[in-house]
Image (cartoon, helix red, strand yellow):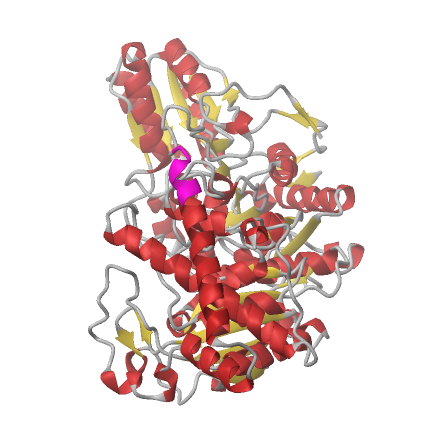
Amino acid sequence: MITYLEAIREAQRQALENDPRVYIYGQDVGAFGGAFKATKSLAQSFPGRVLDSPISEDAMVGSAIGAALQGMRPIVEMQFADFSTVGFNQIVNQAATMFWRTGLPCPITVRLPSGGTPGSGPFHSQNLEALYAHYPGLILMTPATVEDAYAMLLEAVAIDDPVIFCEHKYLYYHLKADTLPKEALPAGKARVARAGRDATVVTYSAMVHESLAAADELATEGWEIEVIDLRTIKPLDTDTVLASVARTGRILAVGEAWPWGGVTAEILARVAAEGFNLLDAPPMRLNSKDTPVPYHPNLWGTHRPTARSIADSLRVLLRS
Amino acid sequence: MHDMFRLAEAPRPSCTAVEFPETYRRAYRWMLLARVAEEKIASLYRGGKITGGVFLGKGQEAISVATGMALRDGDIFAPLIRDQAGRLAFGESLLDFTLTYLGARSGPMRGRDGNVHRGRPKEGLLPMISHLGAMVSVVNGILMAHRFQKKENTVGAACLGEGATSTGAFHESLNQAAVEKLPLILVVTNNQYAYSTPNHRQFACNDLIDKAIGYGVKGHSVDGTDLSACLETIGGAVAAARDGEGPQLVIASNLRLAGHGEHDDAHYISQHFKELQLGRDCMEVAQNHMLAQKWADSSMFDLWHRDSQSLVEEAVAHSLREPAPDPAKEDWCALASRHLLEGNPPQPTHNH
């Protein structure tokens, strides 16, 4: 069995092994192996290519951009997605604009350990995919499975553009698979995680699993729920979403991120604009509450969508 | 002198003591060309021919040219907005300057970016973003890549004003360069004002050079109005970086002899500074030095000025004839991976 976290480590090992242009740069990623051990033993296996950085997210990303311009393929590990805001300027103003301005590709991969876990609180739990997806020139990946964590990270390193790789910390140890995949869907292609006919849930990352659990619960009540795992937020696979809505006539977009703007709003805007006539009911969405992410598990468990709250929303959607 | 048009063909003189008069004369001629070119663009701006801002290096040519001349092929240069002289000396074509200011499709930024935000990163000249402090770590990264690639004896110069020393990016990047022992030359030109903000509202240390010790890097102070001192100091700092002595912080002092941009009348610049040594015009100082040393006479200055004017006129005339970008023909794609543009069909199954 291999976990989601181990898949991320194996993808990095594979990238280092296959491509001499790859190096890893981040806080504590060297001999220590990273705050979550996503780079455990890689510094020993690849001497000089897995480098501890100072606590300097701006300079971490800025230097990765420079190295990428010079032909390298850096992987930057942010210790937590939340800390990437210190490097935000380099990501959105330097990396994202580089190809457009100069015609020179900027192939960096920035790994963001994202999302909530019990007890993590306001500054170790954030989901920032919408923030980065807003900027032209970036690719946003949000793998929900062990297989995708592995295959998509390898693909991220191979892509000629800056990729923001949102790996979910809640899935690090919880999620297991038997083997690593030999092939996968490409970036920009969503996956039907569960087929159904009564309503569509469009989601990504850890919320795929909450949605699948909600679909299981509703199956006991006789409803068949289709669950779409977007895999990449940008580009967003609108075609797969619309095809599903064409089958079910109902859509619930679910995201762990905050409600204002964001991925779920984008999905519903597209469905309303491009598939209004496919809808049998007003589209719905479910996000976290519009507050910082709370520390205490009692509060955290209510702050974010769960299988229960998704199931409740689906019941409303199915009755409307 | 038409070779100045072309980046690849532009000579990069070294500056050793033996060649010093010749080096000094070359430096002066780059400075002169920069000033004449900028005066022309400023006049076009006043005539309404330039879209967007115009930013002059007036008073900053000495430190700028010294930086550009100390670098050679394979080195990296991240200029600031007042580095026209250094850009020319580094090898940027004068046409890149005029085409970009005039928004031509054939310029290096193709009308997508303008004025001072130009560069050719493949040739070591980085196009600045407006958050200037952010360029330093990009230079660091290129130098780190050189190390990975075993590309030896290269250096990178990044140029900032004193205002950028207040940014987090300055701190992070200089510290990073020190930790990695990179061959970075960080040239900070303290021209007394960041836009309109005087130094006493920008920092509270006695002298910016004191920061060097805090970062564990070598510090050099220089009179930015004195071309001899600039050539010597920057030359020494670049040589030290090339010899493996790690990052070098240079603090040059001068006064901005123009507004922040041409939209700014710079009324806030204190008369007091204009009377100090740092308020001198580095071009006049250089001229007087060459006259005193008998390295040039007034007929040579006149000749050089006419040469510069004809080069600039030719570059501007050429650039004015170049077409502007056409929105209908523009490739509105911000991704190098075109297949990942939204609306395009995804590629077939990806094998790993």
Please tell me whether residue B321 belongs to the stretch shown in magenta.
yes
Nearer to me, A14 or B297: B297
Read off the magenta span: B317-323
Give the residue at x 40% y 43%: B317
Q: Is residue A118 above or below residue B226?
A: above
Compared across the picture, whether B263 is left or right of A96 comes to: left
Q: Is residue A187 above or below residue A16?
A: above
Compared across the picture, whether A234 is left or right of B7 comes to: left
Give the residue at x 33% y 77%: B202
Q: Quadrant of residue A214?
A: top left
Observer able to see residue A120: no
The residue furthest front is B299
Nearer to me, B101 or B310: B310
Give the residue at x 69% y 48%: A22
Nearer to me, A316 or A95: A95
Compared across the picture, whether A177 is left or right of B125 comes to: right
Name the spot of residue A260 as percent of width and height, x first: 28, 41
Q: Quadrant of the N terminus of chain A?
A: top right
Per the picture, the main secondary structure of the magenta-coloured stretch is: helix
Name the spot of residue B179 as percent of width and height, x first: 62, 72
Nearer to me, A46 or B322: B322
Give the residue at x 50% y 45%: A98
The residue furthest left is B267
Q: Quadrant of the C terminus of chain A?
A: top left
Please tell me whether residue B127 belongs to the stretch shown in magenta.
no
